[in-house]
Protein backbone atom coordinates (compact mmCIF):
# COMPACT_ATOMS: atom_id res chain seq x y z
CA UNK A 1 0.00 0.00 0.00
CA UNK A 2 1.46 3.41 -0.96
CA UNK A 3 2.49 5.80 1.76
CA UNK A 4 -0.21 8.49 2.06
CA UNK A 5 2.40 11.18 2.78
CA UNK A 6 4.28 10.35 -0.46
CA UNK A 7 1.02 10.39 -2.46
CA UNK A 8 0.14 13.86 -1.08
CA UNK A 9 3.61 15.18 -1.98
CA UNK A 10 3.33 13.75 -5.49
CA UNK A 11 -0.11 15.31 -6.03
CA UNK A 12 1.08 18.66 -4.63
CA UNK A 13 4.14 18.61 -6.90
CA UNK A 14 2.01 17.78 -9.94
CA UNK A 15 -0.43 20.60 -9.16
CA UNK A 16 2.43 23.05 -8.64
CA UNK A 17 3.82 22.05 -12.06
CA UNK A 18 0.44 22.68 -13.70
CA UNK A 19 0.09 26.09 -12.01
CA UNK A 20 3.61 27.10 -13.08
CA UNK A 21 2.90 25.93 -16.64
CA UNK A 22 -0.35 27.88 -16.78
CA UNK A 23 1.24 31.01 -15.33
CA UNK A 24 4.15 30.76 -17.75
CA UNK A 25 1.84 30.45 -20.75
CA UNK A 26 0.35 33.84 -19.90
CA UNK A 27 3.75 35.41 -20.50
CA UNK A 28 4.76 33.71 -23.75
CA UNK A 29 2.91 31.74 -26.38
CA UNK A 30 6.09 30.53 -28.07
CA UNK A 31 8.97 28.76 -26.39
CA UNK A 32 12.25 27.99 -28.11
CA UNK A 33 14.10 29.54 -31.00
CA UNK A 34 13.30 29.66 -34.71
CA UNK A 35 9.72 28.41 -34.69
CA UNK A 36 7.70 29.03 -37.88
CA UNK A 37 4.05 30.10 -38.13
CA UNK A 38 2.81 31.97 -41.23
CA UNK A 39 -0.39 32.81 -39.32
CA UNK A 40 1.42 34.02 -36.18
CA UNK A 41 -0.35 37.41 -36.14
CA UNK A 42 2.24 39.03 -38.40
CA UNK A 43 1.34 42.24 -40.21
CA UNK A 44 0.42 41.84 -43.84
CA UNK A 45 1.24 43.97 -46.89
CA UNK A 46 -0.93 43.75 -50.00
CA UNK A 47 -0.04 45.05 -53.44
CA UNK A 48 -2.90 45.70 -55.82
CA UNK A 49 -2.11 47.10 -59.26
CA UNK A 50 -2.09 49.96 -60.31
CA UNK A 51 -1.90 51.36 -56.76
CA UNK A 52 1.45 49.73 -56.12
CA UNK A 53 3.96 52.23 -54.74
CA UNK A 54 6.58 52.41 -51.99
CA UNK A 55 3.97 52.43 -49.20
CA UNK A 56 3.29 48.77 -49.98
CA UNK A 57 6.91 47.69 -49.86
CA UNK A 58 8.16 46.03 -46.69
CA UNK A 59 11.62 47.20 -45.77
CA UNK A 60 13.75 45.70 -43.07
CA UNK A 61 16.50 46.59 -40.67
CA UNK A 62 19.75 45.37 -42.24
CA UNK A 63 21.23 42.57 -40.15
CA UNK A 64 23.92 39.98 -40.64
CA UNK A 65 22.79 36.39 -40.31
CA UNK A 66 25.32 35.83 -37.52
CA UNK A 67 23.76 38.63 -35.45
CA UNK A 68 20.39 36.90 -35.50
CA UNK A 69 21.96 33.50 -34.86
CA UNK A 70 23.44 35.01 -31.68
CA UNK A 71 20.00 35.57 -30.11
CA UNK A 72 19.53 33.15 -27.20
CA UNK A 73 16.83 32.15 -24.76
CA UNK A 74 17.32 34.34 -21.69
CA UNK A 75 18.70 37.39 -23.54
CA UNK A 76 17.57 40.73 -22.16
CA UNK A 77 15.62 43.23 -24.24
CA UNK A 78 18.77 45.37 -24.39
CA UNK A 79 20.80 42.43 -25.79
CA UNK A 80 18.03 41.73 -28.30
CA UNK A 81 17.96 45.38 -29.35
CA UNK A 82 21.72 45.25 -30.06
CA UNK A 83 21.39 42.09 -32.16
CA UNK A 84 18.09 42.62 -34.01
CA UNK A 85 17.75 46.41 -34.00
CA UNK A 86 14.62 48.44 -33.42
CA UNK A 87 11.35 46.47 -33.42
CA UNK A 88 8.70 47.80 -35.81
CA UNK A 89 5.94 47.20 -33.27
CA UNK A 90 4.86 45.31 -30.19
CA UNK A 91 1.97 42.85 -30.11
CA UNK A 92 -0.80 42.93 -27.52
CA UNK A 93 0.79 39.87 -25.90
CA UNK A 94 4.03 41.82 -25.36
CA UNK A 95 6.02 40.21 -28.19
CA UNK A 96 8.25 42.45 -30.30
CA UNK A 97 7.87 42.40 -34.09
CA UNK A 98 10.83 42.90 -36.41
CA UNK A 99 11.31 43.24 -40.15
CA UNK A 100 14.87 42.09 -40.80
CA UNK A 101 16.74 42.49 -44.09
CA UNK A 102 19.19 39.59 -44.24
CA UNK A 103 22.06 39.66 -46.71
CA UNK A 104 22.44 36.35 -48.52
CA UNK A 105 25.07 34.96 -50.87
CA UNK A 106 25.72 36.85 -54.11
CA UNK A 107 24.51 40.12 -52.58
CA UNK A 108 20.87 39.03 -52.54
CA UNK A 109 18.67 40.16 -49.66
CA UNK A 110 15.57 38.77 -48.02
CA UNK A 111 13.20 40.70 -45.74
CA UNK A 112 11.93 38.44 -42.94
CA UNK A 113 9.22 38.99 -40.36
CA UNK A 114 10.45 37.92 -36.94
CA UNK A 115 8.64 37.93 -33.59
CA UNK A 116 10.29 37.62 -30.18
CA UNK A 117 8.43 36.55 -27.05
CA UNK A 118 9.44 37.31 -23.48
CA UNK A 119 9.00 35.60 -20.13
CA UNK A 120 7.81 37.19 -16.88
CA UNK A 121 11.35 38.57 -16.33
CA UNK A 122 11.33 40.25 -19.75
CA UNK A 123 13.92 37.81 -21.10
CA UNK A 124 13.69 36.13 -24.52
CA UNK A 125 11.61 32.97 -24.18
CA UNK A 126 10.97 32.18 -27.83
CA UNK A 127 11.11 33.40 -31.41
CA UNK A 128 8.83 32.98 -34.39
CA UNK A 129 9.42 33.46 -38.12
CA UNK A 130 6.61 34.07 -40.58
CA UNK A 131 8.34 32.17 -43.38
CA UNK A 132 10.20 28.85 -43.12
CA UNK A 133 12.87 30.14 -45.56
CA UNK A 134 13.94 32.73 -43.00
CA UNK A 135 14.16 30.19 -40.16
CA UNK A 136 16.10 27.85 -42.46
CA UNK A 137 18.67 30.57 -43.23
CA UNK A 138 19.19 31.30 -39.53
CA UNK A 139 19.45 27.62 -38.56
CA UNK A 140 21.80 26.88 -41.47
CA UNK A 141 19.41 24.57 -43.33
CA UNK A 142 19.50 26.95 -46.31
CA UNK A 143 22.08 29.46 -47.54
Image (cartoon, rainbow, N blue to C red):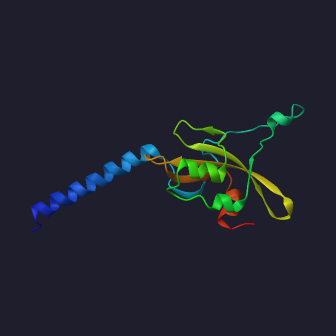
Q: Number of labelled discs?
A: 0
State the residue at coordinates (64%, 54%).
83
Dividing the picture into quadrants, the one containing residue 105 is bottom right
Q: Is 58 positioned to the left or the right of 32 in the image?
A: right
Above or below: residue 141 compared with residue 16: below
Above or below: residue 84 compared with residue 66: above
State the residue at coordinates (68%, 53%).
131
State the residue at coordinates (11%, 61%).
5
Q: Is 63 positioned to the left or the right of 129 in the image?
A: right
State the residue at coordinates (16%, 57%).
8
What is the x, y in percent for residue 136? Answer: 68, 62
Q: Which one is nearer the viewer's eye here, 88 or 18?
A: 88
What is the x, y in percent for residue 19? Answer: 32, 48
Dividing the picture into quadrants, the one containing residue 34 is bottom right
Q: Which one is nearer the viewer's eye here, 95 or 79?
A: 79
Q: Is 133 positioned to the left or the right of 72 in the image?
A: right
* Name of the residue lying farthest toward the top: 51
Above or below: residue 38 compared with residue 132: above
Q: Which one is nearer the viewer's eye here, 130 or 24?
A: 24
Instruction: Tell me the quarter of the image containing the N terminus.
Output: bottom left
Instruction: Tell me the quarter of the image containing the C terminus.
Output: bottom right
Q: Which one is nearer the viewer's eye here, 93 or 85?
A: 85
Dividing the picture into quadrants, the one containing residue 71 is bottom right
What is the x, y in percent for residue 37? Answer: 61, 51
Q: Is 95 positioned to the left or the right of 112 in the image?
A: left
What is the x, y in percent for residue 3? Answer: 10, 65
* Name of the residue lying farthest toward the right: 50
Amino acid sequence: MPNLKNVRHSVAAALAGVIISLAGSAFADVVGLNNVDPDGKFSRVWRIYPDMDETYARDGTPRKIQQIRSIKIGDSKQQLFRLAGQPVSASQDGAWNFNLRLTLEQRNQLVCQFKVYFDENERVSGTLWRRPQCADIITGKRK
